[in-house]
Image (spheres, rainbow, N blue to C red):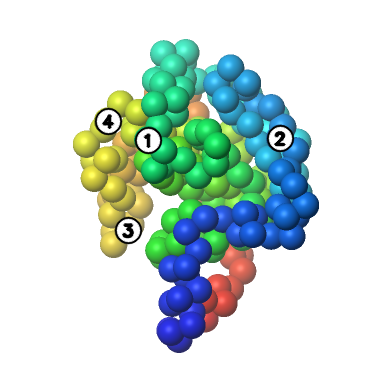
Amino acid sequence: MKVSSIVARYALPVHKTYFADKAMEGFPTYLTICDTSRLFLPALGEGNDARFAEIFRQTWQRIPLRCRRRMVKHWRDADPIHLQGLWSPTVQLVNDWRLSDRVCRTARDMGVCGRIGHSLYFYAPIVDAMPPNIVQDLIAHELAHCYLYAIGDEETMAGSDRTVHRWLDNVEIYADEAMEVWGFSADSIDEWEKDNKWVWDSDPLTS
Ligand SMILES: [Zn+2]
């Protein structure tokens, strides 16, 4: 990897939209997912924001109230060091998975939970291609990570092990378990990706 590529990779602690032209034009419009839970989606226009906000709202309503409350408390008690915007959580539907909050990843993720559950990213091209029920499972999986941070799950707090397959990573196993308890499917996303032969675009930073 070229030095310039390494610099580019580590010099991007926040999402590009903070520096993009459209951000310079003023703050984006926020779509309401659930105002009492402070869940809002900036309409970045990188994917179908309105559709995603509605699916997110439906997903949120399916999660048991006591679990939602644990997450909301976690978000409201956020240490400012974990805030990416003015409040927690930050939810974004973006068209570039490489520039999301966790720049050191090796896997290509369609959804990411960063900053100990205060920052959520979803990769717009794959979200927009998925049917709503699969998008719900994807959102529920990332929210399950938030929940596990909220309850102080030890394995989750220790961090994901990116050196092993996700099937062997306890952080992922526990999130899958939690979402299944909530009534979502932990297998549907992998099945959809396989059935639809999804092809990721190439990574200019590593290829
Ligand atoms: Zn996960």
* Amino acid identity at mark 3: Arg
Q: Which residue is mark 4?
A: 152
**Image position of 156 (left or right of 74):** left
Residue in view at x 65 percent, y 36 percent = 41
Along the polypeptide, which appears first: circle 4 or circle 1? Answer: 1
Q: Which residue is mark 1?
A: 79
Packing grade of label 1 (10 A; few <14, some 14-19, many >=20) is: few
Q: Nearer the viewer, mark 3 or mark 4?
A: 4
Along the polypeptide, which appears first: circle 3 or circle 4? Answer: 4
* Amino acid identity at mark 4: Gly
Q: Quadrant of residue 152?
A: top left
Packing grade of label 3 (10 A; few <14, some 14-19, many >=20) is: few
Q: Nearer the viewer, mark 3 or mark 1?
A: 1
Is 143 situated above or below 195? above
Mark 2–mark 1 Cα distance, whole angstroms, equals 23 Å
Q: Quadrant of residue 156?
A: top left
Residue in view at x 40 percent, y 32 percent = 78
Q: Which residue is mark 2?
A: 30
Mark 3–mark 4 Cα distance, whole angstroms, equals 20 Å
